[in-house]
Image (cartoon, grey):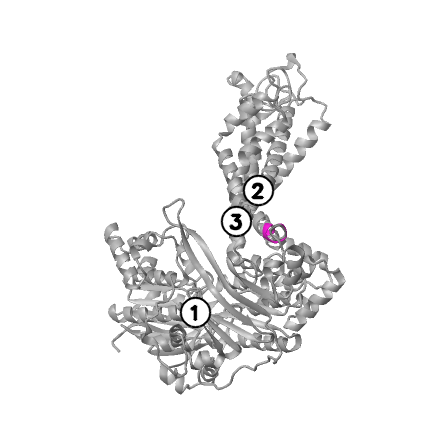
Amino acid sequence: MSTPILKVDNLTVAAGDNRIIDGVSFEVGNSEIYGIYGESGAGKTTLGRALANWLPAGVEQTGGKVLFAGHDLRTTGANRVTIGRDIAYIGAKPQSALDPTVPVGPQIVEKLLMVQPGLTRTEAKQRVMDLLHEVRIASPEERFYDYPTKYSGGMMQRAMIVDALCADPAVLIADDIIRPLDVTVAAQIVSILKDLCLKRKMAVIFLASSLLALRLVAGKVGVMHEGRLIEEQPVETLLTAPKTEYTKTAISHVPRIWSSNEFPEDRGRADDKPLMEVREVSRTYKVRKRGTFGQFNHVKAVQGVSFDIMPRENFGIVGESGCGKSTLTRLLTWLEKPDSGDIRLGGTSLANFSGRELLDKRREFQLLLQDPYNSLPPRVTVGRMIEEGLRLRGTPKAEMREKVKEAMVSVGLPTSIYDDLPNALSTGERQRISIARALVLDPKLLILDETLSALDQGEQSKLIDLFAKLQETKDLTYVFISHDLAMVRKVCNRIGAMYFGKMVEIGDNKSIFFEPKHDYTKALLSAAPTLDEKPFDAGELGFEPIQ
Amino acid sequence: MSDVAQITPTAPVAAENEGQSTVTMRILKTAWRSKAFQFGFWIFVILVVTSLILPLVSPVSATKMAIREKFLPPLFMGEGWSWIHPLGTDQLGRDMLMRCMVGLRYSLMIGIITVVLMFIVGCGLGLLAGFKGKWWDTIIMRITDAQLSLPMIILAITILGISKPSVASIIVVLGLSGWPLYARVARSAAVTEREKEYVRGLRVVGAGDWRILLLYAAPNILPPIAFVAVLDIARMMIFESILGFLGLGIQPPTPSFGSIIADARKYLINAWWIATSPGVFLAVALTAINLMGASLEKARNTVYAGAR
């Protein structure tokens, strides 16, 4: 390692009396990626922002130093512009970092001109264009003038990297940037980041809540717990020989895909008839062509997908974003009707129902939502939210209250929050409300649209246990729609892999994960970050991720 | 939010109210803490109460002419002032204070009623357009476009020229020219709200568009617009005065700010108080409303920023 470009010495950051960062010290050199692992709440984001000299109001650096190329940041570099130029910061939520009213390219040009006033607009534009190319955004000339809403999550994250890199920073702070991304996109971003780090001799501080992500990226990793850096080792050593109990537990909680021989219990019976039959469903969207009046592009979101869902099984649907999972979810929950094909519930086509009958049928299949913060309207009490389904069906008040409380108990919510607003609830509790809302209707089939992806590891396994328990007591069937392969591996009996609107492979847990037949399934699995040895290598299959 | 968590489940009614109003209440409380809001609020209250009560209890009439007492100056402002006419009299000997009070009463009434109507009609249509989308959206938004393309004054001259100007017709004119703005704002908020995850959740449970819109989406969308609407009361009062000034407002002998000022132009050199008094009342009322509106807006921003 060369001389450290960034040196953190006994840094302490506090909000009032509450110490968020407590005496953290480490060094990062040029072309080095330094990883910091920590669970949510460990103080990662505060650390990242302290390094960028960009602490939120009320939080202050109370002790220690951050030395950038030998200068104390606090005394020399309080100027934001300098910070923007030498130290760049990328957050976990790319969507909120860009101004939605300005096209992506011009927005970055604007920032570049601000930090480097000497450039002309044409030069700045060329530079941004080159960078967009460098982070492998397809056809940057066209994308340059697109608004942020037209970018997918992965593209947005890459645009943020461009935004951070345009000023040629010496240090890049990446705060959990790949958490919201699909595995294949994440793998791409990671390789871009590694590339750039070497090419530009940049130091990267990579904060992450996933050891798997760090294994892909970092050379050296520091483990952060309750505001302290409790150990520091090269990543492979850390994973094989952790020094502290905390790290050991963290490693043991990393979900395994291939190193276990356990498979989820099959609760099916010999005489089972399919609960839901999906037959050749297709859905095409018309999207207006840019710059035209009457012309449309036909986007085939789902094409001829067929499968059966058997009672009491866990059926998984995996694939990257853009593969048609969301459309399929809308079809399965009958929020949209397929253009062609048929979805049958208990032998009758859903298309045959309407009005009252459909309302009645809807009791049997319910959806659990993805985003815990947007899944509950903020001004409606918990009880009112859960009972909505019953209220719609004219259930008497006393019975309704009884059922709601029963459902709340069965998902592990205290009935005392019946009249509370959801504001103060945690993500786990919010997802439980969503489950209770479905359960009061006595459903047979629950469709989980990435329901677990927003939760941390601990809360996730608690909910998985809850699902298993409910399955036993209430004879439920689950459809897990997810990009989290490790979770699917642990829970699902049968799995279907989707790619560009088609179901490319359906098989049981063992055959999908250990003997995948389709090339795309292999590519998807090989991109999955894991601590396990992969039973095959499909790195050179050359599947382009969907954009 | 800790105080919310402490509500016991034995008080569903209280909780229900709490549920309707937490954010709104917090905004009101934050606004109330600012001096500017209190100042504006109390001035507003005093103006409303006096303009309602004074003309009823006072023996002096706003419309009774007394030519012998014309052009009396306000208190201590030259020769001939009297305690009976604290703000002096006009060219026909009518008491200025009473005329201003009645004018203020109409001005406030028209301002408030117009804004309430605009809010209801504009937001109602806007929500519908944004939430239902498709042809609802197209039709409603084209109507608002058409409406926006008509200048208010032309609309006023047309409508008030055809019909006899009355309080109702003035409200109709002002309301017609103002509602599209509300429709626009409500629509864009509704479009965002429609895409939120909870709407999808409610649909799967079986709730229809109307139910989701009225029970769940509207309570999220409307309060912020309502706070901004406070400022609009001031705007509508100004428009009412403009119409009066042009002779399209409330017709004499009933006094209105605009018509008093229009008449008083001729006497501006000799009897400045005739034009000035309504102007001062209008200015004070507008200041009060703007103080309230601005503090509410500020409080809203603080509360929303804090909530994140």
Callout 1: SS: loop
Q: What quarter of the picture does the N terminus of chain B occupy?
A: bottom right
Q: Chain of mark 1?
A: A
Along the line of sight, which residue is nearer the eye, A13 or A527?
A527
Q: CA distance from mark 2 to mark 3?
A: 12 Å
The three-letter code of the residue at mark 2 reads Leu
Q: Is residue A390 left or right of A333 when viewed as pictured?
A: right
Give the magenta-colored segment's residue range.
B214-219
Determine which residue is flagged by label 1: A179
Callout 3: SS: helix
State which tag comes first along the sequence, 2 or 3. 2
Secondary structure mostly seen in the magenta stretch? helix
Q: Is residue A426 left or right of A87 when viewed as pictured?
A: right
Q: Is residue B193 above or below residue A484?
A: above
Please provide percent x and percent y for residue A430. Answer: 58, 66
Q: Which mark is residue B189?
A: 3
Q: Are marks 1 and 2 in contact (CB under 8 Å)?
A: no
Please provide percent x and percent y for residue A90. Answer: 38, 64
Determine which residue is flagged by label 2: B125
Please provide percent x and percent y for residue A273. Answer: 61, 74
Callout 2: SS: helix
**Comparing marks 2 and 3, which lies closer to the viewer?**
2
Along the line of sight, which residue is nearer the eye, B244 or A195?
A195
The three-letter code of the residue at mark 3 reads Ala
Answer yes or no: is residue A93 visible.
yes
Disc 1 crowd rating (10 Å Cα; few below 14, some 14-19, many 20+) is some
User: Which residue appears at 59% of the width and 20% of the height?
Assistant: B73
Along the line of sight, which residue is nearer the eye, A82 or A520?
A520
Disc 3 crowd rating (10 Å Cα; few below 14, some 14-19, many 20+) is many
- Mark 1 and mark 3 on one chain: no
Disc 2 crowd rating (10 Å Cα; few below 14, some 14-19, many 20+) is many
